[in-house]
Amino acid sequence: METKLTEYVIEQAEYPVYPRLKSVEDFVDGKGNWDNEAYRQAEEDYLRALENLGKGTGTATAPLLDFADETTGRVFLSSREESVVYSPVSLYVAMAMLAELTDGPSRAEVLHALGTEDLQAVRESVHQLWADSYCDNGVTVQRMGSSVWLNEQVEFHREALQTLAEYYYASG
């Protein structure tokens, strides 16, 4: 009997609808004439749709860059004898999700490591980071993949999983 992991999902992230790129052929009529007006309108519509997704505001980069500056040297200096792969984005997002799943002093410590005391600012930063990297335009698909794996024996709060799905696009 085969078990699918999706059978265990409690909260599923829903990705936003991404605008589709139009093909050049969409702007050429049956006689081979180029419809520049239709092309310009489609381009404006596409850019407006990207703006509506919140892409390109740049608001996510400052906290992440500060975090990367603070952590990168520590990671590489602690591993002088071996090769290292480090993704500040992955660690930042994982720690942000951890902050959502903790409370009290534990949450305060995680937020401090992220360089803030404001959980809402972290949510918005990760949400923007996700939006800026997200693409599913019919030609290219790129998504940051995050999930939470829970021990069935440990109590959890559904609201936290809903927050992870909404702001982090993480399923749990």
Image: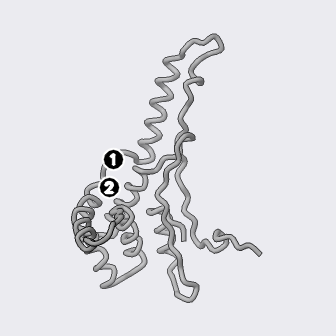
Secondary structure under badge 1?
Answer: loop
Query: Tag 1: Cα neighbours inside 10 Å, few (<14), some, or many (≥20)?
Result: few
* Rendered residue at 68%/70% (across/down): 4
User: Can you tell which mark lies on residue 29?
Assistant: none
Percent x, y of residue 58:
31, 49
Seen from this angle, which residue lies furthest right? 1
- Indicate left or right for 116 with 165 as reference: left
State the quadrant of the N terminus.
Answer: bottom right
> How far apart are labels 2 and 1 at the CA level?
8 Å
Q: Measured along the vertical axis of the image, is residue 102 above or below residue 26?
A: below
Front residue of 76/11: it is: 76
Residue bearing the label numbered 2: 60
* Rendered residue at 49%/74% (across/down): 159
Location of residue 110 (image quadrant): bottom left
Percent x, y of residue 156:
51, 82
* Rendered residue at 54%/71% (across/down): 172
Query: Tag 2: Cα neighbours inside 10 Å, few (<14), some, or many (≥20)?
Result: many
What amino acid type should be assigned to the residue bearing mark 2?
Ala
Q: Measured along the vertical axis of the image, is residue 135 above or below residue 144?
A: above
Front residue of 118/71: it is: 71
Percent x, y of residue 24:
55, 25
- Indicate left or right for 112 with 56 as reference: left
How many circles with numbers are drawn on the protein?
Answer: 2
Residue bearing the label numbered 1: 57
Indicate the colouring scheme: one colour
Location of residue 20 (image quadrant): top right
Tag 2 and tag 1, C-beta contact below 8 Å: yes
